Amino acid sequence: MRSEEMHCQFEMSAIAQTMNNELSSKKREIENQKYDHERKLEDVRSSIRKAQDSIESNKKSISEQTLKKADLVKKYNEEVVKKFDDSKWVFDESTTVCSLCGQRLPEDKIESLRADFSQRKADAIEIFNEEHAKTLAMIVDDGNACAEMIKDLTKNNKELENKINTLKLNEAEEIDIIKGFDEQIPKIPSCADYF
């Protein structure tokens, strides 16, 4: 009888040990799942922070590009009104008189001097106009590049804001899942109660 009683106790102890192992295993499984979701939550939060940092960086760049564009508009307005300065290009009549003897030069020589002067002035006007056009084109290109960058950064911020909204939904889901695990874990007994 005593032996039978001990045998029953050993069997009950073995059953309790098996049950305890299963409870511990179940608890570990839930704790591992909770840990996995806590890691996912941290990843989601990290992604949200990165997206928010990118938005702030983009806003700073947009502000810089807006200031640069305003400066380019100012430069353009200053450049567009520039005209060739004729006042520096007046034919010097003293060149029609010989510097040695003081007599007026022959008409063909004077015509040659005037034609040479006119050609140099025309060349200077052409160079001015080419440089003026290049400068205006460069300012316009830079302004267009600023506008394009502002547009791209603004679009990128919209996309990042949408991404953040989605991530915040994921964050809420992960928090709910973790809360569910937090509610399950205490409900699992640490050992089997067979008494």
Image (cartoon, helix red, strand yellow):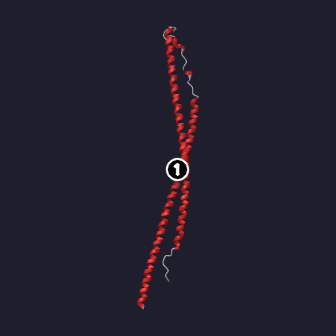
Which quadrant does the N terminus fall into?
bottom left
- Please state the horizontal and vertical placement of residue 153, each as a whole percent of the image: 54, 45
Q: Is residue 21 visible?
A: yes
Q: Is residue 142 above or below residue 32?
A: above
Q: How many marks?
A: 1
Who is closer to the viewer here, 191 or 140? 191
Nearest the eye: 61 or 93: 61
| Residue pictured at 50% horizontal, 18% vertical | 119
Asked if residue 13 is positioned above or below residue 66 in the image, the reply reads below
The residue indicated by pointer 1 is 54
Image x and y of residue 117, in percent = 51, 17
- Residue type at numbered disc 1: Ser
* Residue 195 in the image, given as x and y percentages of width and height: 50, 83
Position in image of residue 183 (x %, y %): 54, 70
Number of residues whose C-alpha sits closer than 10 Å to that of mark 1, classed few (under 14), some (14–19) or many (20 or more) = some
Q: Which type of secondary structure does the marked residue at label 1 adopt?
A: helix
Q: Is residue 96 above or below residue 151?
A: above
Q: Is residue 60 visible?
A: no
For image coordinates 52% across by 23% down, the residue present is 125
Q: Residue at x 56, y 38 (%)?
A: 69
In depth, the one of 22 and 167 nearer the eye is: 22
Relative to 121, say whether 1 is above or below.
below
